[in-house]
């Protein structure tokens, strides 16, 4: 059966480097895996007062239903002020509730951070991992994926250069092995 891997991108920017990297990661999935790009930009900020059964914001319902159909979760994120962009943290929070009904529980995860800066979004990568521990998302440890100086990894045609592509393929290959060993 085809396995569904959700991609969660921590940037809403049209020309996002993170989206470009996420699309390449998706491209490297084996044939019996399907990439599902999950929309985060329409999720109202999490507010417990709005989380009333049957009356939740429609976008929250759509998001929770969609994540429930996934077998694995891949987070590709920039670093904002040395941490996780609010759009991605909000999505984690929306999916984590109602209490006891988290849509994340047990789904094998991958974290990739991407930045034009030299340290490749290390801070965001590790702050994100802190939440994933609590959400019980078992996450690939090695190789760690801090994609720094990303603008130098894009050629004049807008394509990711071969060396970086090879690293992205390695990450996906390792994630798939990890996924198979940890899937629900
Ligand atoms: C609010 C804000 C905070 C940022 N903070 C960081 C940071 O802490 N570390 C970093 O490497 N880049 C930081 N950046 C720069 C982003 O890495 C850069 O804008 C990047 O292109 C965002 O990813 P995207 O291309 O996928 O949108 C920040 C950008 C914004 C808008």
Image (spheres, rainbow, N blue to C red):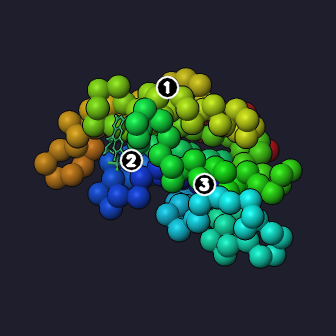
Among the two numbered marks 2 and 3 on one chain, the one whose residue lies closer to the N terminus: 2
Q: Nearer the viewer, residue 91 or 22?
A: 91
What residue is shown at x 64% (from left), y 49% (from top)? 92
Query: Which residue has dot 3 on it?
Result: 91
> On the image, which quarter does residue 119 sit in?
top left
What residue is shown at x 21% (from left), y 52% (from top)? 158
Query: Which structural element holds mark 2?
Result: helix
Query: Which structural element holds mark 3?
Result: helix
Query: Which residue has dot 2 on it?
Result: 18
Among the two numbered marks 3 and 1 on one chain, the one whose residue lies closer to the N terminus: 3
Residue 81's spot in the image, x, y percent? 40, 36
Question: Between tags 3 and 1, which lies in front?
Answer: 3
Q: Where is ligand 1, by quadrant?
A: top left
Q: Farthest residue toward the left?
A: 156
Q: Check the image and report above or below for 73 versus 45.
A: above
Q: Check the image and report above or below for 28 versus 91.
A: above
| Cα gap from disc 2 to disc 1, whole angstroms | 16 Å
Residue 66's spot in the image, x, y percent? 67, 64
Query: Which residue has dot 1 on it?
Result: 144
Q: Farthest residue toward the front?
A: 49
Query: Which structural element holds mark 1?
Result: loop
Q: Nearer the viewer, residue 24 or 98?
A: 98
Residue 68 visible in the shown view: no
What residue is shown at x 42% (from left), y 52% (from top)? 11
């Amino acid at each position: 059966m085809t396995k569904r891997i959700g991609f969660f991108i921590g940037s809403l920017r049209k020309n996002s480097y993170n989206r470009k990297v996420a699309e390449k990661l998706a491209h490297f999935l084996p044939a019996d895996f399907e990439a599902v790009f999950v929309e985060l930009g329409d999720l109202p900020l999490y507010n417990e007062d709005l989380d009333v059964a049957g009356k939740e914001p429609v976008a929250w319902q759509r998001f929770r239903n969609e994540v429930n159909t996934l077998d694995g979760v891949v987070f590709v994120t920039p670093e904002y002020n040395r941490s996780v962009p609010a759009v991605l943290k909000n999505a984690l929070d929306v999916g984590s509730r109602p209490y006891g009904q988290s849509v994340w529980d047990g789904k094998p995860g991958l974290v990739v951070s991407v930045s034009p800066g030299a340290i490749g979004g290390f801070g965001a990568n590790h702050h994100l991992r802190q939440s994933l521990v609590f959400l019980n998302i078992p996450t690939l440890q090695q190789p760690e994926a801090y994609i720094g100086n990303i603008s130098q990894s894009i050629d004049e045609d807008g394509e990711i250069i071969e060396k970086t592509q090879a690293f992205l393929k390695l990450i996906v290959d390792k994630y798939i092995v990890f996924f198979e060993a940890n899937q629900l």
